[in-house]
Image (tube, rainbow, N blue to C red):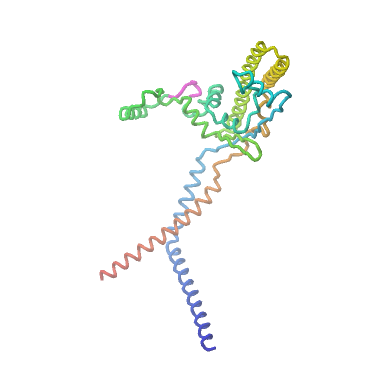
Amino acid sequence: MPEKENNSDDNVNYKSEFSKEDEINLLEYWQVIWKRRKLVGWIVMGITILTVVVSLFMTNIYGASAVITPVELKSTPGGGGTAAALMQQMGGLAGIGLPDSASSAEIMLLLKSNILREKIITEYNLLPVLFSTQWDEEKKAWKKVGFPLILISKLITAVKPADKKIVKKEAGIPDIWDGLRALDDLVKINNNMKEKSITISAEFDDPIIAANLVNYFLAALSDHMSSEAKRVAAINKKYLEEQLLQTADPFIKQKIYSMIAQQLETSMMAEVKENFSFKVIDPPKVPDLKIKPKRVQMVMIAFIMALFMGVFVAFFLEYLEKQNIMKSLKNI
């Protein structure tokens, strides 16, 4: 019994000593911070004010988006497997048939393709919009590059000659490749496989242009897919008409007539364009609020980071001061 009592007393004493050491350490830490409170305060205030000033000079960015979903075309009698089998029996263009409904993957590939984006840039003359700082709106021409930039570009060319296969472009004047790279940064395409939907979103410093960019993609996608469907339907129709002249079997002729009718129906549906290959679930709207920069969040994060930085600097200076004292004591 006395041994147990002694053990319990030792535990109590150990805990009390441990808590006292914690209190002493915390007190020392607080004394260091309080000693250099002015330095910490200047660091926090300086970084916070700098963040506020920088955030105020940042350009407001607006975002617009649209949600679309592929349209599933209903198969008509005589199509599908029967049509495919019949085309295989005919030979030649075996496997061609009705233009099937586009999948999300196909629409995604088209939206990300350079073919569609180049068409958008050319048709809507987007280069002056994407590179507005380099465009002179009054003269309707690109601004001339200053002498220093021309000199720098010539020096770079002299040191490292450009590839002869690359098409040379005039300095300071954006071309189609610059436009494609700009669209990659401004327009994002996301595929929601679970909901079978595709979101097209655009960010720009002008809310109207942000919404227009999304509309341009929708219009170009609809035009491209309907034109492609009409082109394929015309090729199929011509091939079927040729096969019709070469066969005497009434059953096969009946099937071919049915398939020609389907090609005509597809071509007529493509003429309408709207909701032919995809349906717009949520059309783009001109945004009324910016999406970035989030100034309040930036200032709060800067304040917290500055506080940590100020405390770190305070402890680091205290450490250096102690090291100097120790060196001076050793020298004595």
User: Which part of the image, by quadrant, shows the C terminus?
Assistant: bottom left
Q: Which of 227 and 328 is in front in this view?
A: 227
200 or 308, which lies in front?
Answer: 200
Residue 284 position by quadrant? top right
Which contiguous range is marked in magenta?
136-143
Considering the image in quadrants, where does the N terminus appear?
Answer: bottom right
Residue 259: x, y in percent?
A: 69, 19
Spot occupied by residue 218 in the image (x, y as percentages of width and height) = 62, 28
Q: In this view, does 200 lie to the left or right of 252?
A: left
Between 105 and 286, the one lying in front of the other is 105
| Apparent side of residue 140 relative to residue 320 in the rendered image (left or right) | right
**Residue 176, how many percent across, how many down?**
48, 25
The quadrant in which residue 320 appears is bottom left
Residue 53 lies left or right of residue 160; in this view the side is right
Most distant residue in the top direction:
245
* Count of labels in the image: 0
Picture coordinates of residue 169 (x, y %)?
41, 23
Q: Residue at x 63, y 18 (%)?
A: 90
**Left or right: residue 86 compared with residue 20:** right
Q: Residue at image x 64%, y 20%?
A: 89
Res 113 quadrant in image? top right
Residue at the bottom extreme?
A: 2
- Residue 217 is inside the magenta segment: no
Front-most of residues 287 and 250: 250
User: Image height check: is 314 above or below 189?
Assistant: below
